[in-house]
Image (cartoon, rainbow, N blue to C red):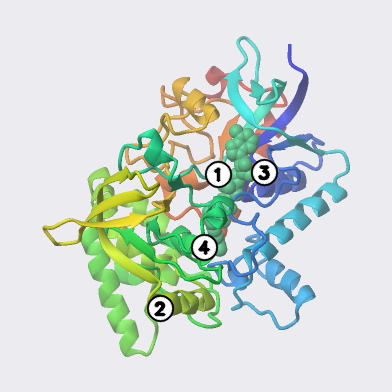
Amino acid sequence: MTDDSTPILIIGGGFSGTLTAIHLLRTTTGQAASITLLDPAAVPGRGLAYRGNDDNLLLNVPAGNMSAFADDPSHFVEFCQQIDPSFNVGSFVSRRLYGRYLQLNLQRAMAANPGRLRLVQDQAHAVHSRPGKDGFTVTLASGRLLAAQHVVLALGHQVPGFPLPLPPKELEKVIEPWDFQRMSQLPGDAPVLILGTGHTAVDALFQLTQQARPRRIWMLSRHGLLPHAHRLNPVPPATSQYPTYLGEAPLRVRTLLRELRKEIARKALAGCDWRDVLNQLRPHTPRLWQAMPLVERQRFLRHGMAFWDIHRHRLAPLSADRLQALKESDEVQVLGGRLTNMRATSRGMLQVQFRPRCQPREQSLEVAAIINCTGPRMSIGSHSSPLLQQLARDGLLVPDPNKLGVLIDDHYQPTCSSGQATPGLWYVGPMLKAQHWEAIAVPELRGHTQRLAQHLARQLAIYPVLPTQAELA
Ligand SMILES: Cc1cc2nc3c(=O)[nH]c(=O)nc-3n(C[C@H](O)[C@H](O)[C@H](O)COP(=O)(O)OP(=O)(O)OC[C@H]3O[C@@H](n4cnc5c(N)ncnc54)[C@H](O)[C@@H]3O)c2cc1C
C-alpha cells in the first residue's frame, strides 16, 4: 500500500528539479496535472551550488548569461537590478543571490498555480516500477511510500572519488569539497592539502583563507593548472551559428584542437580574445562531442580535458584577483603531480607522498587534512546514493562507457539495459554530460529542463495513463 500518489514526482529540488517543476507548471496548465517536488531541504530551489550564504563566492558566469529561462535572457539581470541598478549583463554576482533568485521563481510559479505543486521534505531511497500497473512506487528515507505516474530524476552531483584506498584513520582526515563547516573547524594554523585545482578547489581555498591566521596550503593536481579568468564586464555571447572554420564536425580531437588554435590565432590578429572563440563554440560542443567516436572521446578525456576545463570554466575577475594574491603570498603553493601514498601519523597528522610532474623522485608533506576536490563522480558504484545504486542494479539506469553519466535518449528518458526507455522515467542534470559533454552549467541545463518538461507534457496529453513498452515501440 502506498501512502500517497502523484501524477509527476520530481526527485531533487536543486536547479534542475526546480526549473523542471516551473516549466511543467507552465506547459501543463490545461491538463491541471499536479506535481510533487521532493528534496531534503526545508525550502528547495538552491541545490548544492547556490545554497551557501557567503557573498564572496561568486558565480563563474556573467549575470547576462544566468537567466533561468532561455527564452527570457535578461530575466536574471532585471532581478539583480531591482536590488542594485548598477548591476549589468557583465556583472559577476554572488551564488547566494542566485539561490534567492531560484527560490523566488519557485514561489512565484507556485503562487500562480495554486495547489498544483506540492513540496515534500524527504529523500528517495528507491524507485520501483509497479508490476502490472503503470508508474512507480517510490520509497522515501522516512519510510513513506509514494506512487507516481512519472518520476523525474534531478539528483545533481555526487561527491568526488579519492585516488587512493582510504583506511579508517586516513579517511577521518579527508574532507568533502562542499563541507565548509568541517573546514572551518580545522585549527586556524593547520597545514592543509587541497587535492585538485579546479573551481571547487578554489572555493575550498577561499574558505580556508577566511581566517586571519595564515596557514600553509598546498593545491595538488596532475597538471597543477588553475582556471583562467573571465574578462572584466564581458558581454554574454550572442547566439551564434555553427563555426564555419570547423567545416564538418571533426571526428578527431587533434583536428578539432588544431582548427581551434588556428582560429584563435586568426582572431588574435584581428584584436579579438581567445575567450570569444570558445564562447562561440559553446552551444555547438554537444554536436562536436556526439560526432566523435568513443576512442576519440577517450583520447580527449586523457589528454585534452585538463586544458579544456581551465579555458572553458573561467573564474570571475574578482575571484581570479583574489586567487592571484593568495598565490603570490607565502601561504599557498600550487603543485603539479600525482598523489602516491598517505598515512596517518602518531601526532594526528597525515604524511602525504606525491610524485611531482615529470620528476622521478617523490616528495612528502605533512598536513592536518586533505580537502578532496578531484571533481564530482559521474559513474555509479558503491560510492553512489542508495537510490542511484538501486536504479543501476535494476537496469533502469545504465552507465555510459566513459563513466560520465548515464545513457539517456533525446527525450530525456534513461535507456535501460534492453536499450529501451522505461515509460514514465526521466532524467535531467549533470549526468547529461555523457551525451552532450557541455551540460552541467545553467546556460545548458535551463534548456534541458524546458525541453524535458515539453516532452513530458506531450506524453501526459497523449497518454493520460502511461503507455506500455509495446505501445511505445
Ligand atoms: C559549487 C558549484 C558552483 C557552481 N557555479 C556555477 C555558476 O556560477 N554558473 C553556472 O552556470 N553553473 C554553476 N554550477 C553548475 C550548475 O549550476 C549546477 O551543477 C546545477 O545547479 C546543477 O543542478 P542540479 O539540480 O542538477 O543539482 P543540484 O542543484 O545539486 O540539486 C540536486 C538536488 O537533489 C537533491 N537530491 C539528491 N538525491 C536525492 C534523493 N535521493 N532524494 C531527494 N532529493 C535528492 C539534493 O539534495 C539537491 O538538493 C556550479 C556547480 C557547483 C557544484
Callout 4 amino acid: Gly
Figure quadrant of the N terminus? top right
Q: Residues within 10 Å of mark 4 (few under 14, many from 20)?
A: some
Cα distance between the residues tagged 4 and 3: 35 Å
Which dot, 4 or 3, sits closer to the camera? 4
Mark earlier in primary sequence (3, 1): 3
Kind of residue indicated by mark 1 = Gly
Residues at marks 1 and 2, CA–CA distance in whole angstroms: 35 Å
Which percent across, then down, holds residue 54? 64, 64
Q: Secondary structure at mark 4?
A: loop
Q: Amino acid at mark 2?
A: Ser
Rounded to the nearest angstrom, the CA distance separating label 2 from label 4 is 17 Å
Number of the front mark, 2 or 3: 2
| Residue at the spot of label 3 | 13
**Which of the marked residues, 1 or 2, is nearer the chain's N terminus?**
1
Sequence-earlier tag: 1 or 4: 1
Residue at horizontal 47 percent and vertical 37 percent from the top: 408
Residues 202 and 136: in front is 202
Kind of residue at disc 3: Gly
Separation (CA) of disc 2 from disc 3: 40 Å
User: Which tag, 4 or 3, sits closer to the chain's start?
Assistant: 3
For label 4, the residue is 188
Contact? badges 1 and 4 (CB < 8 Å): no
In this figure, which residue is indicated by the disc labeled 1? 156
Q: Position of residue 275 (x, y in %)?
A: 41, 76
Q: Is residue 447 visible?
A: no
Q: Residue 116 appears in which quarter of the rendering? A: top right
Residue at horizontal 50%, vertical 28%? 421
Instruction: Between residue 271 and residue 320, name the one nearer to us.
Output: 320
Residue at coordinates 48% horizontally, 79% vertically from top-left? 321
Question: Which comes sooner in the sequence, label 2 or label 4?
Answer: 4
